[in-house]
Amino acid sequence: MGSLTVNKHKLKRFAIASKPVMEKYLSKLEVDLSDYTFAANFIWLANSSGFYAIINKCFCLFVMTGGELTMLLPPLGKKKHINDAIIKCFEIMNSNNSSPYYSRIDYVQSSMLEEFVQSADEAQSMFEMLESYIVEKKLVDYVYEVDALIELRGNSYHTKRTEINKFIKSYSDYVIEPLDSVKHKDEIVHLFNKWVSDRVRYMPKEEAEVFLEGIHQERHAVKQMLKHYEALSLLGLVIYINGELKGFTVGERISKDTATVIIEKTDFEVLGCAQFIFREFSKMLKEHYGVAYINVGDDMGFENLRKVKMSYRPFKLVPKYTIYQK
């Protein structure tokens, strides 16, 4: 599918060539949410098609899924332009969609939400705005101080240090390398497939079915990451044990002070590998980008993932919202 015209607005295809356009608008924002990068949106589009348009001087990113348009992010631009852009974007979605029920804007950071709600000049128009839209808090991003992840000091990190020490003792021949998308491609795909099969093996049948339904998107993201690794300016790390690739992780910079981990996978059966590679990658992100914080994204609503991310004692939890119409 090429471009898309909706309500006289031409939406261009969101492709790798869109990177400099989107990043021009992102560079003017102060954000620390993991969703606000080109790569984070580009690699995760699996069964959907992305489109964008410049509306009211804002970069507006849409996604078409099953014939219905939604927005992956709120309009990206100066605060004074966001409010009108949001209203126009809903008009575009409503013109395309079979019902206004499907129209929504995901991953809205709080500062943009405040601007949307408070930008009206008159109290009456603000009241009308709140009468027309529903704002729902969704997930939170987990943000950590990078030095805390590297040093792992104190009783709260005792278990992490123990797991890492056991890993180093058990696998003293480990080798760490910067990720090379050509050299490591086949081994990364093999590890990902093993990770999926191992996870399913230990899951109750009903959970496994739900898990497998969503795994296609993540497999697609890994392939997109590898295919466009250099063009996306990503940073990655792999770990070998006994000559076999047992873990990989990939990240990028979000802002001046914050980097993010996009994907991380380790062999489920190598105890301590996940904790070890996370610490080593934290060192790499700090050294390469000079950041003070690392955002590892949200927990996707999975309780086990929430427990793991909370166990690292986040510096802050950054909420993100979805805007619906009433």
Image: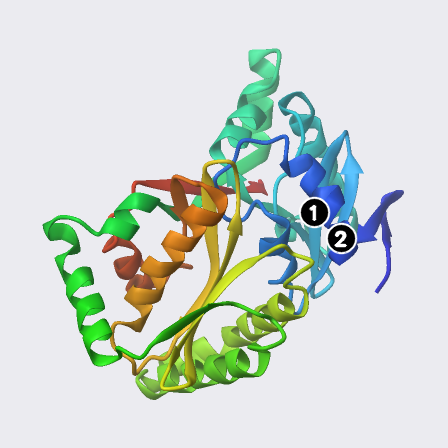
Q: Is residue 309 visible?
A: yes
Task: Using a 10 Å C-alpha cutoff, classify the residue at mark 1 as few (fewer than 14 neighbours), some (14 to 19) or many (20 or more).
Answer: many
Element type at mark 2: strand
Q: Is residue 102 above or below residue 167?
A: above
Q: Nearer the viewer, residue 162 or 265?
A: 162
Using the rendered image of the protein, determine whether residue 145 is visible from the camera's viewpoint: no
Picture residue at 42% right of the left edge, 54% below the top: 284
Residue at the extreme left of the image, as rendered = 155
Circle 2 Cα neighbour tier, 10 Å, few/some/many (<14 / 14–19 / ≥20):
many
Give the residue drawn at x 66%, y 25%: 78
Q: Residue under label 2, please give it.
A: 51
Of marks 2 and 1, which one's residue comes earlier in the chain? 2
At mark 1, the secondary structure is: strand
Comparing 107 with 159, the one in front is 159
Q: Residue furthest top?
A: 122
Q: In the rendered image, which quarter contains the C terminus? A: top right
Residue 197 is drawn in which quadrant? bottom left
Q: Is residue 214 above or below residue 27?
A: below
Location of mark 1 (residue): 61
Query: Are the residues tagged 2 and 1 within 8 Å (C-beta)?
Result: yes
At 48% from the left and 48% from the top, the residue drawn is 288
Please name the amino acid that badge 2 sits on: Phe
Under mark 1, the amino acid is: Leu
Query: Where residue 30 appears, x then y in whole percent?
Result: 54, 31
Q: Who is closer to the viewer here, 25 or 72?
A: 25
Position of the N terminus, as image quadrant, is bottom right
Q: Compared to 30, does 306 lie above or below?
A: below
